[in-house]
Image: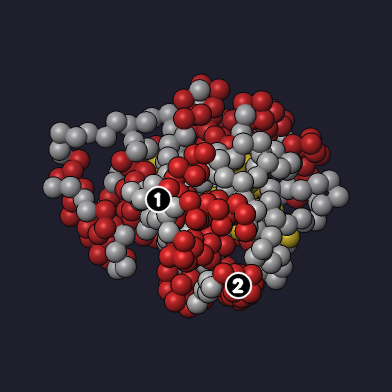
Amino acid sequence: MTINPYKLNCKSKSKRIQALSESITFEMKSDEKVMPRENDSNNHIHTTYSFSPYSPTAAAYAAYKSGLKTCGIMDHDTLAGANEFSQACKILKMGYTCGVEMRIKFKLGQWGRMNHPDQLNCAYVTAHGIPSTSIQSFDKFLKPYRLVRLERSKAMVDKINIHFKKYGIYLDFNMDVYEKSEAADNGTITERHILYALATKLEERYGRNSTLIMFLENELGYQLSKKQQKYLLDNDNEYFLYDLLGIIKSKTDFFYIDADSEMPNVEEFIETTKTFGGIPAYAYLGDVIDSVTGDKSPQTFEDHYLEKLIPELKRLGFEAIAYMPTRNTKEQLFRLKKLCKQYQLMEISGEDINSPRQSFHCKALEDPEFSHLVTSTWALIGHERNSEIDIDNGLFSKKSIEQYPNLEDRLSYFEALGKASINHYE
């Protein structure tokens, strides 16, 4: 008995969990065993509650099928999918972490662009290791920001409609964007939702042929690689809309509107995350030369002022640096690792899953140089479970720091707690 992937992505949350629960016991006993990837982790998996082809249940299952022993949910501005995700992970006997990704006001523009391709004095950050006991309260804090973001999304759709009117293309915000999201269930509408809707309209208008490619290049000014052209010409390409979305997102000036009141400032983000038992992390991007996700143009970010940025993050109260290892060169990662060790900042890895082409596992973690990222994942899990019992008992609590002043020793202790926690699933 195999699991029907459509059942894991159906609209009913309870039916998704039920489908997983009913089928997984049989699958685990089958001859088709999943090859476990012990030296791997992914703490940055988006779901349909921000933008992704995977519901929280489907995301956990896809991580399990890829061989991961741990996985982490990371949606934009919402924790609405966290409880479902953790429930699915328990059924799958996987370690799990819950987090949220946000944009914050961060005035360091005098040094250069941080990690946001489209906006200065604005940064992507993540709150990791949020205990289940704080999910509801933290999400209540996030709700006003989601509502403001919703209004900005409407304005960006209006801007697209003005731009594309001469081409006979029109987006209905409610039908084409809102209804295709989980916004009605406290999910977030992101720029990707909008561009997915636009990609759908472009396919309807131009089809999957050279006419579409000519429109993108001659009318909109995109430079398509041979690989991208091949994807767009393939009538059997099941990922066509995601591929087209990635192309469109590489140039955003025709629709992007700067975020403002939908973002807390950096101090508020850090204080709030710690209040709810989470670990505030800065999401390092690093200079982009060749975008592995296909949706970023070559651009410089934090690398030329990293030695100033890291101590400033520490001073502000950040406790970790999060990053996607496959986005960066070894030289970038070694430099970052050295600075994190110097300033006693935890390193958290994750592959930014929001497209079906992306792999859930991280090949970079096969290198022994990055084994500490697996340790930190289990420590993150241990932090969550410990904080659920007592929010003042986490990885960066006063008590834990006094007991293990050195971060490396503390991570080892919490790693053991994380690994042991799976044995206590109901």
Judged from the image, the secondary structure of the residue bearing numbered disc 2 is helix
- Left or right for 118, reference 410: right
Q: Nearer the viewer, residue 69 or 55?
A: 55
Residue 416, numbered label: none
Residue at 80% across, 56% down: 107
Q: Earlier in the sequence, mark 2 or mark 1?
A: 2
Q: Position of residue 413 (x, y in %)?
A: 50, 34
Residue 295 visible in the picture = yes
Dot 1 amino acid type: Tyr
Dot 2 amino acid type: Lys
The outermost residue toward the right is 110
* Residue 337 location, quadrant: top right
- Left or right for 203, reference 154: left
* Residue 310 location, quadrant: top right
Q: Nearer the viewer, mark 2 or mark 1?
A: 2
Residue occupied by mark 2: 166
How is the model colour-coded?
secondary structure
- Left or right for 16, reference 341: left
The outermost residue toward the top is 368
Residue at 52% across, 39% down: 226
Image height check: is 77 above or below 310? below
Q: Position of residue 166 (x, y in %)?
A: 60, 72
Q: Nearer the viewer, residue 183 or 300?
A: 300
Residue 239, numbered label: 1
Q: Position of residue 258 (x, y in %)?
A: 71, 65
